[in-house]
């Protein structure tokens, strides 16, 4: 497969093949027309847990968790964007799933195009990030981390408290299955599309607890990239119920003050009048005048006419 290099002692050595075999990353040489694995180095054999001859009888579709049509679609999309890397989930012989980044370089050998593919296991990059883990566990908000297929990988304690699920109940399920009310499928699909496009989502909406209670939350969801690979999606949920309760209370208080027959005047710490009710105008004859000061608004009181 490579030029023959003549060594000083007269022995013929295939230098390129030696470099291929001893590469620290798993390397697969793939025939792109059908996905056939033509060659694999020792690191690949150790990673995938197959003997070399077994791997060479397999195709990339045998180790990929995605259906063949989805794999071909990803490859076509990468070609369209002129990218040489792919993001896949590969299944090892023992059944474990690993998140991998595949860098494929087209090479010509004996008149045929092959893909020289370097496989990088990125599964543990996010989990091993101590800074992220501190933020994840100590955040005052509910946080969910999903894989590329939007299945839950982990949730923090605040998520458990807010939505009523135990951590083990969430793993492998999607947010739609866990906390989206019925009829919200279109919203879930729309959010997935935005994340796939690299967008950060901020929206106020309804979510549902395990018991079926509908709650108002603010969602902040963002894609997590490592080396240009979408490794995960991080979703933060902020409970808006207290804010809504406070707003409702303030509206009720304003209604009480507005409708009382006692004159009410509210001032700030500087003695500037912020608000008066109608009863104050009736009693004193002064009306409310709103005047802008910079970016803020305050009130003055003027004598009523008539």
Image (cartoon, rainbow, N blue to C red):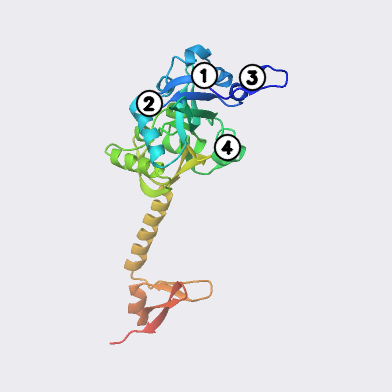
Q: Secondary structure at mark 4?
A: helix
The alpha-carbon separation of the residues under discs 1 and 2 comes to: 22 Å
The alpha-carbon separation of the residues under discs 4 and 2 comes to: 42 Å
* Residue 38, image x, y percentages: 47, 20
Q: Nearer the viewer, residue 9 or 209?
A: 9
- On the image, numbered disc 2 is attached to which residue? 33
The label number, if any, that marks residue 133 in the structure image: 4
Residue 240 visible in image: no
The relative height of residue 270 versus residue 180 in the rendered view (above or below) is below
The earlier-in-sequence mark between 4 and 1 is: 1
Q: Secondary structure at mark 1?
A: helix
Marks 1 and 2: CB-CB under 8 Å? no
Q: Nearer the viewer, residue 242 or 142?
A: 142
The relative height of residue 206 versus residue 210 in the rendered view (above or below) is below
Residue 292 visible in image: yes
Horizontal relation, residue 226 to residue 288: left or right? right
Q: Nearer the viewer, residue 201 or 281?
A: 201
The alpha-carbon separation of the residues under discs 3 and 2 comes to: 31 Å
The label number, if any, that marks residue 13 in the structure image: 3
The earlier-in-sequence mark between 4 and 3 is: 3
Q: Residue at x 40, y 22 (%)?
A: 61
């Amino acid at each position: 497969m490579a030029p023959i290099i003549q060594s000083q002692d007269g022995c013929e050595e295939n230098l390129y093949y030696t470099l291929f075999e001893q590469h620290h990353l798993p390397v697969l040489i793939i025939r792109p027309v059908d996905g056939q694995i033509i060659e694999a180095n020792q690191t690949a054999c150790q990673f995938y847990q197959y003997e070399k001859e077994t791997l060479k009888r397999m195709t990339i579709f045998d180790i990929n968790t995605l259906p063949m049509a989805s794999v071909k679609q990803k490859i076509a999309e990468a070609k369209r964007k002129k990218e040489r890397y792919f993001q896949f989930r590969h299944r090892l012989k023992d059944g474990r799933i690993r998140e991998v980044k595949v860098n494929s370089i087209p090479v010509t050998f004996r008149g045929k195009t092959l893909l020289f593919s370097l496989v990088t296991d990125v599964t543990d990059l996010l989990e091993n990030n101590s800074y992220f883990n501190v933020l994840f566990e100590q955040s005052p908000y509910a946080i969910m981390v999903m894989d590329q297929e939007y299945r839950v990988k982990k949730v923090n304690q605040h998520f458990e408290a807010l939505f009523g699920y135990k951590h083990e109940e969430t793993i492998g399920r999607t947010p739609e299955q866990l906390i989206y009310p019925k009829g919200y499928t279109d919203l879930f699909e729309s959010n997935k599309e935005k994340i796939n496009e690299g967008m950060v989502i901020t929206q106020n909406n309804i979510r549902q607890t395990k018991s079926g209670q509908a709650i108002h939350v603010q969602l902040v969801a963002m894609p997590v990239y490592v080396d240009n690979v979408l490794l995960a999606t991080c979703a933060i949920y902020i409970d808006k119920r207290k804010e809504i309760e406070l707003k409702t209370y303030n509206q009720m208080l304003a209604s009480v003050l507005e409708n009382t027959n006692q004159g009410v005047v509210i001032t700030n710490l500087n003695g500037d009048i912020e608000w008066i009710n109608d009863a104050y105008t009736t009693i004193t004859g002064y009306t409310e005048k709103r005047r802008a000061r910079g970016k803020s608004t305050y009130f003055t009181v003027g004598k009523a006419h008539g």
